[in-house]
């Protein structure tokens, strides 16, 4: 037996669902097709109760998932939802994979989605890079409408909400232009992993394979049997119309579904254990940590609420607030003069570079075009956590 790869098994996301699971998909899909957005969880819960399924949350969590079935780690399933706290006013969303089981969604999240993906893959492959500089290439909503003249503005506006729940696409979409429904999509290199995908089942299979690979640890063959022995064996309205290549379905009154915290990203930016350690310092140190504590708590709240501008301002406030803890007058001085470890010095330099972006968020005046800053433009959370780790250790 080959024990050299330790990782999750791959459930079949296309395997038949039971009656309760199918009922849940239908309740969510019907409302989405009517209004263009996913219903509140309280509505889903009550509708499931009316249908004779008393524990809707258990049904939701029973849907098949590939990868890490936990709040952290790469995962993909039939639904996106906050696995830490499923609030009544949250909006769990179905993924493209749900189209394998939902006749109602199959056309919108099936044939049309695959055509959109194939379009992006084709455009990415056509990009001719420069040998002298590295710069991203984009497709905009205007480009998309030009190449698919039959598409409605409402359908184009709804696409980022669909992308938000697909691992390969969620990293690329940003608001763009003066049109409220406008967007641009970066033709990033990972699109090449989806070349040759021809249908919905093939796409879901490809996502599942990539997700399992992201959670698989490869170890030296000589160590594999011993590790395996330790781990054991359980280691608006959407009118259904023709396909995209012939003309898109009409979507009226659709809005971009509000994203919930996806399971592959923790619902926090600052590590909660660090926040608890900081709180324990209150009243015990020469320098008061009260404001810093409030800043990081507000930062996490804004991160969970998807408030990118507030997050940028709060990260800037944190890095400007902490230099006295490190014996410095400014963050610039702390970045250059404080005795960091080699790795932490790189992190702090990234935070120093981020100050220009934060200045953009806070000081750029209103203009005719839409802003393009999103939550995903924040610096890696590991950078700010490393800074806070050092500050907490230095508080006396």
Image (spheres, grey):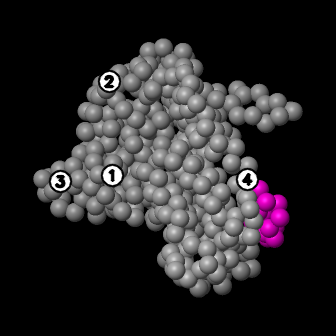
Residue 197 visible in rendering: no
| Figure label count | 4
Image marks 4 and 1: residues in contact by CB distance under 8 Å: no
**SS state under label 1:** loop
User: Counting residues from the N terminus, which is met first, the one under dot 4 or under dot 3?
Assistant: 3
Q: Could you say where residue 80 lies in the image, as x and y percent from the top left? A: 41, 52
Q: Could you say where residue 282 lies in the image, as x and y percent from the top left? A: 52, 77
Within 10 Å of disc 4 (Cα), the crowding (few <14, some 14-19, many 20+) is some
Q: Is residue 72 left or right of residue 29?
A: right
Residue at the spot 27% in from the left edge and 55% down from the top edge? 88
Residue 239 quadrant: top left
Please name whichever residue, 394 or 225, is drawn nearer the observer in this view of the structure. 394
Q: Could you say where residue 287 lies in the image, as x and y percent from the top left? A: 61, 74
Residue 224 visible in rendering: yes
Residue 106 quadrant: top left
Q: Which residue is mark 3?
A: 46
Alpha carbon of mark 2 to alpha carbon of mark 1: how far? Answer: 23 Å
Image marks 4 and 3: residues in contact by CB distance under 8 Å: no
Alpha carbon of mark 3 to alpha carbon of mark 2: how far? Answer: 27 Å
**SS state under label 3:** helix
Q: Which mark is residue 90?
A: 1
Q: Which residue is mark 4?
A: 352
Residue 340 in magenta stretch: yes
User: Counting residues from the N terminus, which is met first, the one under dot 3 or under dot 2?
Assistant: 3
Image marks 1 and 3: residues in contact by CB distance under 8 Å: no
Query: In the displayed structure, would residue 355 be above or below residue 3?
Result: above
Please name whichever residue, 264 or 377, is drawn nearer the observer in this view of the structure. 377
Please name whichever residue, 308 or 192, is drawn nearer the observer in this view of the structure. 308
**SS state under label 2:** strand
């Amino acid at each position: 037996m080959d024990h050299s790869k330790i990782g999750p098994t791959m459930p079949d996301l296309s395997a038949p669902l039971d009656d309760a699971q199918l009922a849940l998909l239908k309740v969510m899909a019907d409302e989405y097709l009517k209004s263009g957005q996913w219903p509140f969880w309280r509505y889903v819960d009550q509708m499931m109760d009316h249908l004779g399924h008393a524990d809707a949350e258990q049904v939701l969590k029973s849907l098949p998932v590939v990868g890490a079935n936990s709040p952290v780690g790469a995962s993909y399933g039939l639904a996106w939802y906050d696995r830490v706290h499923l609030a009544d006013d949250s909006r769990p969303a179905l993924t493209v994979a749900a189209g394998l089981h939902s006749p109602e969604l199959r056309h919108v999240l099936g044939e049309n989605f695959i055509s959109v993906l194939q379009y992006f893959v084709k455009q990415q492959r056509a990009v001719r890079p420069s040998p002298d500089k590295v710069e991203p290439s984009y497709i905009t909503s205007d480009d998309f409408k030009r190449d698919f003249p039959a598409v409605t503005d409402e359908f184009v506006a709804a696409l980022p909400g669909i992308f938000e729940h697909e691992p390969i696409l969620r990293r690329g979409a940003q608001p763009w232009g003066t049109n409220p429904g406008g967007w641009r999509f970066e033709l990033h290199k990972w699109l090449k992993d989806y070349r040759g995908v021809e249908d919905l089942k093939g796409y879901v299979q490809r996502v599942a394979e990539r997700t399992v690979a992201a959670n698989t640890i490869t170890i030296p063959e000589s160590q594999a049997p011993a590790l395996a022995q330790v781990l054991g064996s359980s280691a608006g309205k959407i009118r259904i119309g023709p396909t995209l290549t012939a003309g898109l379905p009409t979507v009226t009154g659709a809005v971009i579904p509000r994203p919930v915290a996806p399971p592959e990203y923790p619902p926090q930016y600052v590590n909660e254990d660090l926040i608890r350690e900081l709180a324990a310092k209150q009243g015990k140190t020469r320098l008061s940590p009260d404001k810093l504590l409030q800043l990081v708590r507000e930062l996490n709240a804004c991160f969970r609420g998807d408030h990118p501008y507030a997050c940028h301002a709060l990260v800037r406030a944190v890095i400007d607030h902490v230099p006295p803890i490190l014996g410095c007058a400014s963050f610039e001085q702390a970045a250059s003069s404080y005795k960091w470890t080699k790795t932490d010095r790189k992190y702090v330099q990234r935070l120093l570079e981020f100050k220009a972006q934060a200045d953009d968020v806070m000081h750029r005046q209103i203009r005719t075009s839409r802003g393009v800053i999103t939550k995903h433009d924040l610096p890696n959370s590991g950078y700010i956590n490393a800074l806070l780790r050092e500050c907490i250790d230095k508080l006396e």
